[in-house]
Image: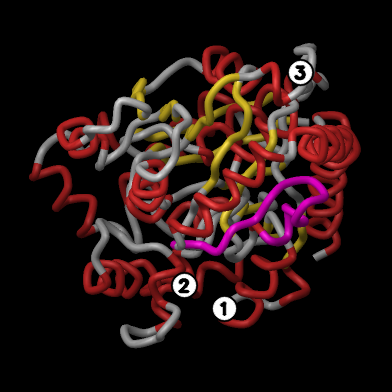
């Protein structure tokens, strides 16, 4: 099977990029041909002129059509195209292009951008769905521009949501439920040995350094604690936090390789996911499950579909630094219980989120989409 994988990278590497890489690797290991069509914000949006040009074409890009025409000439017609992120460089024009060539389209819904316009400006839960540049107004304007050609979403064969929570959100606002399929993210297995929490050091945060990820609440909570915190990753708040950090227990490491992140995780007592907006499916949770590291996460949105409190992780009230600090104290006081929770999570990883399980789900989605497309 020949698969075109289409994606738009942001400036900072994140979970969506990781998913794209993992799926490409998985498909190639199973003898499928994967052609990655990836555009990169850090390359194509390097000037103000380029940014304005991208904004102008954010609903429909003729440049994207030209790029895809060239790729088809180079690689031939694929059996299926799997779209991940189209914002801001690709645009809805890609759906028009592949639909006219009678190629089935799968799209993974990693975030809630398609819903933004439907929420309006004054929805009391609006901030949970994420923002563009931390701005409610900019987000609304962007969503208006994107949805100018939302009619092209009807050309998509199936949408993948990562959890039941996400499926309900999208079916409520914009996409018919019969077009939505749940398939979680996954990771390749690891041979790393699981260690008891008492033999590990420090806590870890490994994600984007931004407000919606809850990193500011995390730092405030650690001002009340005597345990070291390793912060891994990059993002818009990294420089600010580095400049203002006076807590010697908090160490910022910046971007590290995935191997280095895994090594940190395997040797950390627990991994904190303090998100304050709705996530797709945090890869940091799966990485911790795989490495046998306890997960401490906020009780918001899709995270509650993944983490069952005190079974495969610990939940705290999102945005509540006192509850976060109290849960950390509980973890440190209950190592034996935490070891069992970690073991449960690792077993769940093997049953639900391993590469083999995910491949079976993904190829079934592809085959059904190809069959459905031929039938129509």
The x, y position of residue 233, in whole percent, is: 40, 29
Asked whether the residues under the numbered discs 3 and 2 touch, taking CB atoms below 8 Å apart as contact, a structural biologist would say no
* Label 3 residue SS: loop
Category of crowding for the residue at label 1, using alpha-carbon neighbours closer than 10 angstroms: few (below 14), some (14–19), many (at least 20): some
Q: Which residue is mark 1?
A: 174
Q: Which residues are magenta?
A: 304-319
Res 212 seen here: yes
* Label 2 residue SS: helix
Asked whether the residues under the numbered discs 1 and 2 touch, taking CB atoms below 8 Å apart as contact, a structural biologist would say yes
Residue 150, disc: 2
Drawn side of residue 176 relative to residue 323, left or right: right
The x, y position of residue 145, in whole percent, is: 30, 70
Asked whether the residues under the numbered discs 3 and 1 touch, taking CB atoms below 8 Å apart as contact, a structural biologist would say no
Which label lies toward us, 3 or 2?
3
- The residue drawn where x is 60% and y is 71% is 154
Type of secondary structure dominating the magenta stretch: loop
């Amino acid at each position: 099977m020949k698969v075109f994988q289409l994606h738009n990278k942001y400036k900072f590497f994140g979970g969506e990029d990781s998913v794209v890489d993992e799926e490409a690797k998985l498909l190639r290991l199973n003898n499928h041909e994967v052609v990655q069509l990836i555009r990169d914000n850090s390359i194509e949006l390097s000037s103000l002129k380029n940014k304005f040009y991208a904004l102008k074409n954010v609903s429909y890009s003729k440049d994207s059509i030209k790029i895809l025409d060239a790729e088809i000439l180079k690689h031939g017609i694929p059996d299926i195209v799997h779209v991940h992120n189209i914002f801001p460089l690709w645009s809805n024009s890609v759906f028009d292009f592949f639909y006219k060539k009678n190629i089935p389209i799968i799209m993974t819904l990693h975030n809630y951008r398609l819903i933004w316009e439907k929420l309006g400006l004054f929805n009391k839960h609006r901030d949970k769905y994420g923002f563009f540049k931390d701005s409610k107004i900019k987000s609304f304007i962007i969503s208006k521009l994107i949805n100018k050609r939302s009619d092209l979403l009807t050309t998509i064969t199936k949408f993948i949501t990562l959890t039941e929570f996400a499926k309900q959100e999208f079916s409520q606002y914009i996409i018919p439920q019969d077009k939505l399929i749940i398939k979680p993210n996954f990771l390749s297995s690891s041979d790393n040995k699981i260690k008891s929490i008492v033999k590990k050091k420090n806590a870890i945060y490994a994600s984007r350094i931004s407000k919606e990820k809850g990193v500011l609440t995390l730092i405030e909570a650690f001002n009340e604690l005597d345990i070291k915190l390793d912060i891994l990753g990059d993002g818009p708040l990294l420089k600010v936090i580095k400049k203002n950090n006076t807590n010697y227990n908090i160490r910022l490491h910046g971007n590290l390789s995935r191997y280095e992140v895994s090594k940190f995780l395997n040797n950390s007592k627990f991994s904190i996911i303090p998100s304050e907006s709705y996530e797709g499916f945090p890869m940091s949770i799966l990485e911790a499950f795989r490495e046998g590291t306890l997960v401490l996460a906020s009780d918001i949105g899709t995270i509650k579909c993944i983490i069952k409190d005190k079974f495969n992780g610990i939940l705290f009230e999102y945005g509540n630094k006192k509850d976060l600090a109290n849960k950390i104290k509980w973890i440190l006081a209950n190592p034996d219980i935490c070891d069992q929770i970690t073991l449960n999570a690792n077993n769940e990883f093997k049953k639900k989120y391993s590469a083999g399980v995910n491949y079976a789900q993904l190829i079934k989605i592809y085959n059904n989409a190809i069959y459905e497309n031929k039938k129509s």
